[in-house]
Image (cartoon, helix red, strand yellow):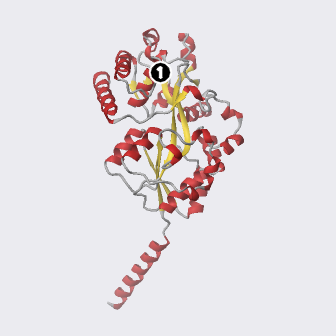
Amino acid sequence: MRNNLAKKIIFCLSFLVNLANAKPILNVYIGSNYIADDTIKRLQQICKCSLSQNYFNDNEEMLAKIVAGASGYNVIVATSYAVNELVKMDKLMPLDFNKIPNIKSIDSKFMNQAYDPGNKYSVPYAYTPVFLAYNQDRMKQLDITPNSWAVVFDPKYLAKLKGHITMFNSSRHIFAAALLYLGKDPNTTNRSDLEAARKLIDKSSPYWAKFDSDSYYRGLLRGDIWLAMSYSIDIYKTIQDAAASHSPIKLAAILQNEGNMYELDNMVIPKSSPNKNLSYSFINNALDPQSAYELSKATGSSIPNAIAFKKLSTDITGIDWIYPKDMKKMHVLEAYDPKTRILVNEMWTEIQMECH
């Protein structure tokens, strides 16, 4: 009996020692393939923690989970309008810049955005242009240059491309593209403009293969998708994969003449963060020029870090669908007012039910 009691005591003491020595977990809610491996290793050494990445594919998905009560994240990486939505929900804590000295590395043109004046709640992490990627041989055969949103909205192009187009499963990006094609503000809340965009989408979507924000690049690689609304971070990796596998399919990408959206992603700290020190450690390390350099080099992410940008090869900075030359034609998504959000959500639900 005494031996059994001694064993139990030793086991309990051992458990408590191991528990005390366990590394804290740094939980980040972020898109996939959005942190370089070298950065993760360095961060974990600095904070003496283990990084746990929780992924989401679309900011609407992330917002829905937060509304539903998801918590426990130290940092969330959210795009422009999503930051504004989280602030309205009273989910974010104001930032203390004294704990983020590396913020000095950020190019000032990416600071003080309309969705967060003065960067009270957010700091820029990276940005991702949205454009059209395409199968070069198929476009050449069809004599189509996809430098306009017309190729996904004009019947003269759609007839040639039917069943070989994917567009994002995102009301914000689909409506923005339609509005840009119509010469309208992609963030308009004007009902007649939104209804015009809705009609255009209704006429065009039967020609599209599907709405796909997650695996569209696989269709491009297989060759059954010839044209896809795309993120730069996905296409950069897809082109690399095609080259590495000696694929016969040649992929390319291009910005559209009417303009494009880009997701300016930001790091924010939820009020529910279980460890604010870990939150600040992650943010400051992510803003280190070396981390930003690693991110862009490894994933093709566009970085707002001015110091890191100077270190990058022109092989990356010279690609205009990663680093657009004319930022005046690039737009960030802005938060809708409640009435417009309900209207667009209703339209989007009807579009998906009718066509796909």
Residue 94 appears left or right of 322: left
Image quarter of residue 245: top right
Q: Is 334 positioned to the left or the right of 146 in the image? A: left
Secondary structure beneath dot 1 equals helix
Specify whether 121 is left or right of 307. Answer: left
Mark 1: which amino acid?
Answer: Leu
Q: Nearer the viewer, residue 192 or 265?
A: 192
Decide which of 58, 332 is in the foreground and name it: 332
Regarding residue 166, the answer to whether it shows in the image is yes
Q: Decide which of 110, 221 is in the foreground and name it.
A: 110
Pick out the residue farthest to the front.
118
Q: Residue lying furthest bottom in this view?
A: 2
- The residue at the point 55 percent across, 47 percent down is 35
How many numbered circles does the render carry? 1
Side of 105 where 73 appears, left or right: left
Task: Give the residue at x 39% y 79%.
Answer: 12
Where, by quadrant of the figure, is residue 93 drawn? bottom left
Q: Position of residue 161 (x, y in %)?
A: 45, 15
Residue 22: image location, x then y, percent: 48, 69
Name the spot of residue 136 as percent of width and height, x first. Answer: 57, 19
Please name the residue shown 55% across and 58% down the image. 281
Please, is residue 306 above or below residue 73 in the view? above
Relative to 122, does residue 164 appear above or below in the rendering?
Answer: above
Residue linked to disc 1: 180
| Residue lying at 41% horizontally and 56% vertically, measured from the top left | 271
Q: Residue 262, image x and y in percent?
A: 52, 32
Q: Nearer the viewer, residue 347 or 81?
A: 81
> Which quadrant is home to the N terminus?
bottom left
Residue 167 in sight here: no
